Image: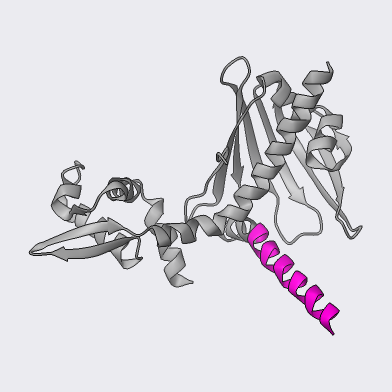
Amino acid sequence: MERKTKIHAEDGKQEITITREFDLPLELLFKAYEDPEMVEQWMGTKVLKLENKKHGGYQFETTDPKGNKHGFNGAIHEFIPNKKITRTFEMENAPFDVQLEFLEFEQLTDDTSKLTMHVIYRSVAVRDQILKLPFAQGINMAHNRIQDILSKLK
Amino acid sequence: MNLRRDVFQAIADPTRRAILMLVASQSLTAGAIAANFDTARPTVSKHLAILTECELLEQEYNGREVYYHFNPKKMKEIADFIEPFRNMWDDRFNKLETVMKKYKAKK
């Protein structure tokens, strides 16, 4: 499959850039971030609060397959429709400090658009840990699956 | 772990990335690689040494000439590390695209 999402992470830097081109007009791409109902659908999260304005805030909550609730929230610093959102992002009850996110929305053609997410972390170490999270989770999941299989054999 | 960090440092430099792009298609001598850059020859040699040390490049002796070629295995190691993170975002964005296309169709 074509690699649509690109991650740019230079070693020794406390930032990353995520870019993605969408088969969607710019307005629809932006709506996915602006409209709480849409956010709920694609992020699979509950939107407790979403104030799309300068000095606004947002609060989301997801429930994992085990029924545990995970909250995340942030403050919105800039909200320019169809163009830019600047916000902070914080995972609740996680050992990571808040991160700063610049989301830029661009029109490519009438039917395609591009999102550039520039994320800045508190330190290089925090960035690397967060980059490794899905990697570590993957290993954990594989490990759990092996344990499941083994326990059934007993 | 140290070695891995070196690999990341190696690809953080734009000249070194350009060198990797060059040798990805064909093996080249140090001279032929240096001819592609305005940088001084010793600087290019230093970049080649770093890339060789962390095994992104391999040296091959052909008579008196040393050819550098690209080691895709090492490059894959880097990709493997970031890949789950990239996949996570790719899945999310695919979902976004699907949800918004459905929404558009409904309108």
Q: Residue furthest front?
A: A153
Q: How is the image coloured?
A: one colour
Q: Quadrant of the N terminus of chain A?
A: top right
Residue beneath the point at 7% across and 64% down:
B64
Asked whether residue A142 is drawn in magenta, I would say: yes
Work out whether residue B51 can be spotted: yes
Q: Residue furthest bottom?
A: A154
Q: Is residue B52 left or right of residue A32?
A: left
Prevailing SS of the magenta stretch:
helix
Residue beneath the point at 82% across and 81% down:
A153
Q: Which residues are magenta?
A: A133-154
Percent of width and height locating residue A99: 67, 47
Percent of width and height locating residue A152: 85, 78
- In this view, the residue in front, A144 or B12, is A144
Percent of width and height locating residue B81: 55, 59
Q: Is residue B5 above or below residue B85?
A: below
Q: Is residue A16 above or below residue A145?
A: above
Percent of width and height locating residue A66: 89, 60
Q: Is residue B3 above or below residue B89?
A: below
Work out whether residue A122 can be spotted: no
**Which of the 4 image quadrants contains residue A4?**
top right
Q: Quadrant of the C terminus of chain A?
A: bottom right
Asked whether residue A51 is drawn in magenta, I would say: no
- In this view, the residue in front, B73 or A136, is B73
- In this view, the residue in front, B92 or A96, is B92
Q: Is residue B57 left or right of residue B1?
A: left
Residue beneath the point at 60% across and 46% down:
A120
Residue beneath the point at 45% across and 65% down:
B5
What is the number of callouts on the image? 0
